[in-house]
Amino acid sequence: MKRKKREVLAGWIFLLPDLVGLSIFVILPAILGFNISLYNWSGLGKMKFAGFSNYTKMLTDPIFLKSLKVTIEYVFMFVPLNFLLSLSLALLIKKPSKGITFFRTVYFAPAAISLVSIAFVWSYIFQQNGFFNSILSIFGISPQPLLGSMGQALYIVLALSLYSSIGYFMVIFLAGLNDIPEEYYDAARVDGASYWQTFWHITFPLLKPTSFFVLIISLIQGFQLFDQVYVLTGGGPFYATSTVVFYAFQTAFEYYQFGYAAAMDFLMFIILVILSLILYKILKGGEVK
């Protein structure tokens, strides 16, 4: 019993720094944000209590509803694509071979570069008279509106997000793959299992903890989309790439409606918590049985 108590105490000691950070940078700001959302406040001067009027206002705000729709569309594209592409890259570079270190470095490099820096480069590539349209003209394809198109801009933002993130998650998956004992694969080869049978019955089930982590972080990243939109499109054209987080930023720092902006952000926080709990329930917290 004493040994068990020491192990539990050691566990809590290791968790303490994360719990302190979580409390200071997540839980406390969420509580303060909810408090501000109950007021009408310009950021200066006296705060006027408004109750839940900021929340009911969202139901009739067409820009917010459009931003929520864009956010959901983006998340539904980003999360599965990020998962599949990063897992595919990890499987591709798992086995040691000649030159594999070079490819690992190349694939991971975008994750080590500032997202804002990458976005500025992409803004020049995908502008109307930019590099991408110059390449299209070589093949006789007429110039595309790209970032000026309501139908194309969000996909460019999505491509940028995937380009900058899959290298990081590739490394996470690679760590998970290297954790799987090689004896399982040896036994599968002896039994004559094909590559896909080995993947579905050994690799994928044993990657469940890693998959859970990747899906949760991808979900959070998806709902927090901001930098790419701010640099590439500014939410345009006609709010086609405006996410809830970006619209909340505009509401607070351009329209000076901090209470309304806080209400939007707190709603996103609640949605994220609910979706994370659903994902936790479906994947059973990444537990491997």
Image (cartoon, rainbow, N blue to C red):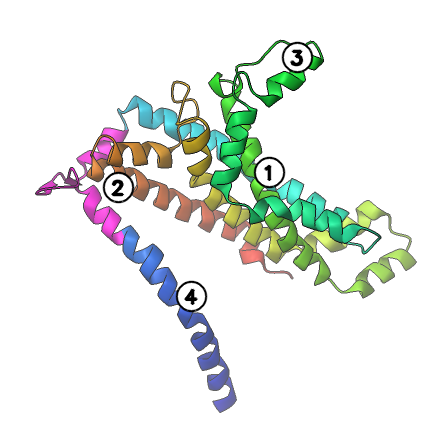
Q: Which residue is mark 1?
A: 163
Circle 2 is placed at which residue position?
262
Residue wearing tag 3: 137
The answer to the question of whether label 2 and label 1 lie on touching residues, with beta carbons closer than 8 A, is no
Observer-nearest of 260 and 231: 231
Please check the rendered image and state whether residue 46 is part of the magenta-colored stretch, yes or no: yes
The residues bearing labels 2 and 4 have C-alpha atoms spaced at a distance of 25 Å
Q: Earlier in the sequence, mark 2 or mark 3?
A: 3
Q: What residue would you read off at disc 4?
A: 18
Tell me where the magenta segment starts and ends, as one range. Answer: 31-58
Residue 156 image position (x, y, % from top left): 54, 27
Q: Nearer the viewer, residue 19 or 58?
A: 19
Look at 62% across and 9% down and name the residue there.
Answer: 142
> Where 73 sits versus 165, above or below?
above
Q: Secondary structure at mark 1?
A: helix
Q: Earlier in the sequence, mark 3 or mark 1?
A: 3
Tell us which disc is closer to us: 3 or 4: 3
In the drawing, does residue 133 fall left or right of residue 261?
right
Within the image, what quadrant is residue 250 found in?
Answer: top left
* Residue at figure coordinates x 9%, y 42% from the top left: 45
Q: Say which of marks 2 and 1 sits in front.
A: 1
Q: Between marks 2 and 1, how big is the CA–CA gap?
A: 30 Å
